[in-house]
Amino acid sequence: MNFKIPRGTQDILPEQSAKWQYIEQRAHELCRTYNYKEIRTPMFEQTEVFARGVGDTTDIVQKEMYTFDDRGGRSLTLRPEGTASVVRSYVENKMHGLPDQPVKLYYIGPMFRYERPQSGRMRQFVQFGVEALGSDDPAIDAEVIALAMDLYKGLGLTDLKLVINSLGDKDSRTAHRNALIDHFKPRIEEFCSDCQARLEKNPLRILDCKKDHGHELMDTAPSILDYLNESSKAYFEQVQRYLTAIGIEFVVDATLVRGLDYYNNTAFEIMIDGKGFGAITTLSGGGRYNGLVEEFGGSDVPGIGFALSIERLLMALEAQGIELPIQEGIDAYLVVMGEEPKNVAPKLLHDLRKQGLTVDTDYLNKKMKAQFKAADRLNASFAIILGEQELENDSVMVKALSTGEQEEVKVQELVSYLKSKKK
């Protein structure tokens, strides 16, 4: 029987995993400078965590979740996104009582959505995201956006476009919601079944419909910006002032609504207009979700966050021809000749590795010439030659593979010799 990888998933092979590690390390380092701390939540939760947290009118909840019953009859779901799990953990672990507020968290991990696989859209994908809970200061909205932009720019991406919008507070959203219902209701039968179901539940989601995006009523739909009350307007204007002060360019787009039910006030997406990447394409998005903590039984705690796909980030880097500075090769390759030298080789290797040197050797009993070829394939800086004569002299022969120069070195001096040459 031939086993194949499930549709919509991928094997990240060794030649690619180094890129993933580099990006993840950059994300860890960036979050440290912004004082965001890592949180790790389970890969599956009670289904209600996502039905309540993401919103039962979203495509994610209605069509894309991997849901199953465990042996106890409990409905569980593989996490389709990170925010709901973080908020659940925030409430369950009473993080609102921590002395340092707001609570600033980040995560990196796999998510799962059952959707049609395509380039940059997998059924299992990896998200990096941040969440800041406990502050409704517009400055932290700007901080979250700046963190996302810093990651992209720090990796060398150009042609980035930040699009922002305000979805308003509860009163503004209610007024806009009623206006949308009045606008779409007379001709709602011309829209898809999903939009018809959303009309009364969440008409804002109609604006995000991919099937009906070309309908004429979409272009004339009431703008949320016309329904913002004074406090929502002031909040949005302050976010813009902070972004300008930081030096982040942006475009205001009143049609930006995002795909999740929990957003309010600030919403944003970061897009790329990259040659070879197609039309302007969304790389990441996020926004403010005041009220979500209450949905999980917590107090009235505001929050904001974003998430980005590592896969789409890698696609963008490839499209722009950006080579990540991945450290390749090894420090040394141990070439062993003879039975007795082979007996002492494992200890020598172990001693070198304990000193932080990257070394390898042959385990297939290859001839000396083949061992040197293996050293070249591994891009080794040095070949350490250990034969009968070297063993008797308590030494090794070290050959610089870039120049061909070689030198006899005492075993007890080998570490310091390699490290000095490495510098």
Image: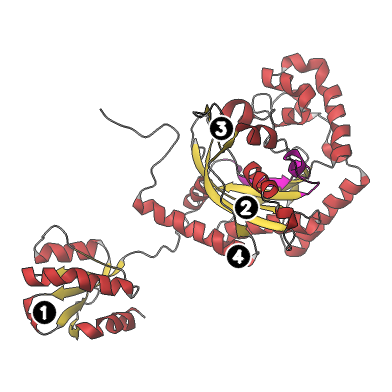
Cα separation, mark 4 vs mark 2, equals 24 Å
Q: Residue furthest front?
A: 72
First in sequence: mark 1 vs mark 2: 2
Checking the image for residue 76, the label placed there is: 3
- Give the total number of marks visible in the rendering: 4
Amino acid beneath label 3: Leu
Q: Is residue 423 visible?
A: yes
- Up-down: is 399 above or below 228? below
Residue indicated by mark 1: 391
Name the front one of labels 3 and 2.
3
Secondary structure category for the residue under label 2: strand
Please provide percent x and percent y for residue 312: 53, 46
Instruction: Provide residue 194's location: percent of width, then percent of height.
Output: 68, 21
Q: Is residue 262 magenta?
A: no
Q: Which residues are magenta?
A: 279-302
Q: Which residue is mark 2?
A: 160
Nearest to N terminus: mark 3 or mark 4:
4
Q: Which mark is residue 32?
A: 4
- On screen, residue 273 versus residue 402, left or right, reads right
Label 2 CA crowd tier, 10 Å (few <14, some 14–19, many 20+): many
Earlier along the polypeptide chain: callout 4 or callout 1? Answer: 4
**Above-or-below relation of 54 to 336:** above
Amino acid tagged 1: Leu
In screen coordinates, is 25 left or right of 139?
Answer: left
Question: Element under label 1?
Answer: helix
Can residue 155 be seen? no
Kindly indicate the quadrant of the structure image that contains residue 134.
Answer: bottom right
